[in-house]
Amino acid sequence: MPKILVIQHAASEGPGTFEEEMKKAGLTWEIFMASDHAIFPSGTKLEEYNGFLILGGPMGVYEEKKHPWIQKEILIIKEMLRQKKPILSICLGAQLLAKAAGAQVTKGHQHEIGWLPIRLDDWFYKRNPLFFQIDPAKEHTVFQWHGDTFDIPVEGYRLAWNETYPNQAFCYQGNAIGLQFHVEMNEAMIKDWVSDEENRVKIMAAGGDPDKILSDIPKYLPTLQAMAHKIFYGFASLIRDNRRQAA
């Protein structure tokens, strides 16, 4: 049975709805919690996995002095890229992937928090198995929580954008995907994040309304989870195809 390594960076930022998607796809997984004292899997241990899911976190890629493990993880992601196995990365995970692929990651000009729109690139989405089932003709409302941004790696291509941050998703090497937005969210995670008092202050400072974010859950979460299903279905297909080719 194919096995995924899930790299988690914060207790509150787990796989969310992807846990159910992994079960549906017949995948097994192991969660690795990144920290200064953790020993990242590498070499033959890393080769045991058929794909990689890299989650979000509140830290910045450029905060290596505060979080020394960031440099270690970037090296491990480079090793993942050399193995050419499928990678799906979210928010901080996407920024780490971009950095490992040679792109710049910087502080953004403003925070994006809450339910916000994105659009797909009209041509490139058709080339990507994670996005080809998603309608490119309309705007999609996704869940955002970030203040940093990334450039698209050389030899990569953009998959999604919006007016605030033009780089919302990218593909590198054909099977390494970075999403700035959070498709993995479930209702419990959203309520947990938004109900935190410090986070409520951040939301209001970014011009958002915490109560509106919560009241909009029934409106936007079902379509977000439908998008998550389509994206993860494509990711699982990449994992199975890659595994067959390696056999």
Image (cartoon, helix red, strand yellow):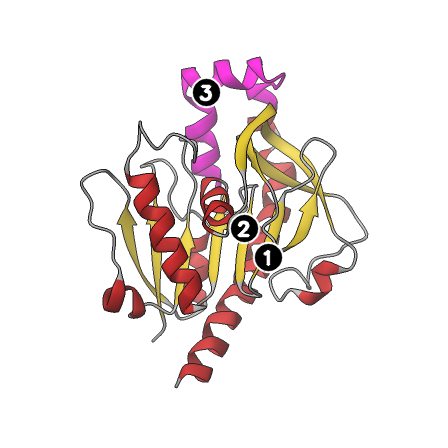
Amino acid found under the numbered disc labelled 2:
Gly
How far apart are the alpha carbons under marks 1 and 2? Answer: 6 Å
* Image location (x, y in percent) of residue 200: 49, 17
* Image location (x, y in percent) of residue 117: 70, 37
Which dot marks residue 199? 3
Q: Closer to us: mark 1 or mark 3?
A: 1
Q: Quadrant of residue 81?
A: bottom left
**Residue bearing mark 2:** 178
* Residue located 58% across and 66% down the image: 174
> Which one is earlier in the sequence, the residue at label 1 or at label 2?
1
Amino acid found under the numbered disc labelled 1:
Cys
Q: Is residue 23 visible?
A: no
- Against 177, is 12 above or below? above
Looking at the rendered structure, the number of numbered marks drawn on it comes to 3
How far apart are the alpha carbons under marks 2 and 3? Answer: 24 Å
* Residue located 54% across and 65% down the image: 175
In the image, is residue 197 part of the stretch drawn in magenta? yes
